Image (cartoon, grey):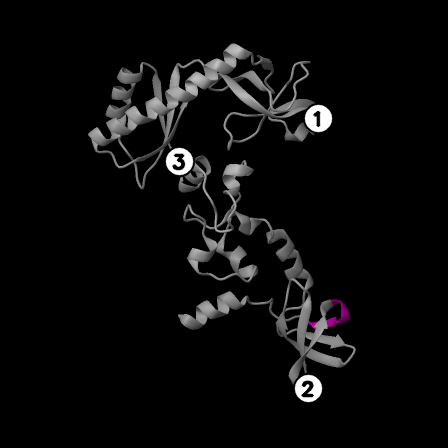
Amino acid sequence: MTQVIAVKFRQDGRIYYFDPDNLKIESEQYVIVETSRGIECGYVSQGNHSVPDNKIVAPLKKVVRIAGDKDLEKMQANRKKEAEALAICEELVAEHKLDMCLTGAEYAFDGSKILFYFTSDGRVDFRELVKNLAARLHARIELRQIGVRDEAKMLGGIGLCGQPFCCSRFLSDFQPVSIKMAKEQGLSLNPTKISGSCGRLMCCLKYEQDAYEHLIKTTPGIGAIVKTYSGTGVVSDVNLITGNLMVKFEGNEIPTKIHKSQVEIISSGKKRKPKAEEATENND
């Protein structure tokens, strides 16, 4: 185990571990640390605590100091300058007629570099833009193209559930999400119902996927032959969440509802096909 502190450099950003270097650091404090981009001021999301060694990316950098009043004033001044720099950049983007949408700007703590984030459908030749920005802002300029998910994370908003975006609240990394997850969870495959404001599949599809995969493995599929207290029958429908099966018995066209714990599988059938998928295929 290694003692660390957890630091974020943006409210919606990733968490990085640093060595507290024998300092007692509390949550919600600010610290000055050395990063690959130079000296930065970061927010402590979790104070001194221990984590397994395999969670650490070596070498673990040490905290330079706990941020003082002057450091915090400098950080606040940088936040104000970021808004001004973004306005100048938007003006120059319009002058150069570049097909790019600016998302945000970020000053290095020492003010020597400004990082601009933007989205675009294709590649953008921004060499002249960088020259003009450097001349206007007197700092090194870096432009970074990001995806629509990163844009939603930075800008924030309200999701279909009525809650603020998960990505801008607590998700530090984007997990892979696929249409297969929506199918296995029996959701409507209508893109407007399973896509977030960013236009990509909703991140929350991942939350329950492990549970659905477990239920699919442990639940008889449609067409499975099962032995029950009423005899041997064939599974005609499945409810993964409740575990209830609809079982048809020979000589009785009306299926009987039986819980999966009360049956013994004699022959496996195909796994449940979500109704959403069936409806989509019928409409094709």
Q: Residue at 70% x, 26% y: name it.
A: 50
Range shown magenta: 261-267
Q: Nearer the viewer, mark 2 or mark 3?
A: 3
Q: Quadrant of residue 18?
A: top right
Q: Considering the numbered disc 1 on the image, is that residue within a helix, a strand or a loop?
A: strand
Left or right: residue 111 versus residue 275 is left
The Cα–Cα distance between marks 2 and 3, rounded to whole angstroms, is: 60 Å
Establish if 49 lies above or below 253.
Answer: above
Q: Quadrant of residue 242?
A: bottom right
Q: In the drawing, what numbered circle is on residue 146?
A: 3
Q: Nearer the viewer, residue 167 or 160?
A: 160
Residue type indicated by callout 2: Glu
Marks 3 & 1, CB-CB < 8 Å contact: no
The Cα–Cα distance between marks 3 and 1, rounded to whole angstroms, is: 33 Å
> In the rendered view of the protein, which quadrant contains the C terminus?
bottom left
Horizontal and vertical percent position of residue 172: 54, 36
Q: Considering the numbered disc 3 on the image, is that residue within a helix, a strand or a loop?
A: loop
Q: Nearer the viewer, mark 2 or mark 1?
A: 1
Horizontal and vertical percent position of residue 92: 24, 26
Q: Tell me the residue that label 2 is attached to.
A: 250
The Cα–Cα distance between marks 2 and 1, rounded to whole angstroms, is: 62 Å
Q: In the drawing, what numbered circle is on residue 50?
A: 1
Left or right: residue 1 versus residue 189 is right
Establish if 178 lies above or below 221.
Answer: above
Badge 2 crowding class, 10 Å Cα cut-off, few under 14, some 14 to 19, many 20 or more, is: few
Q: Considering the numbered disc 2 on the image, is that residue within a helix, a strand or a loop?
A: loop
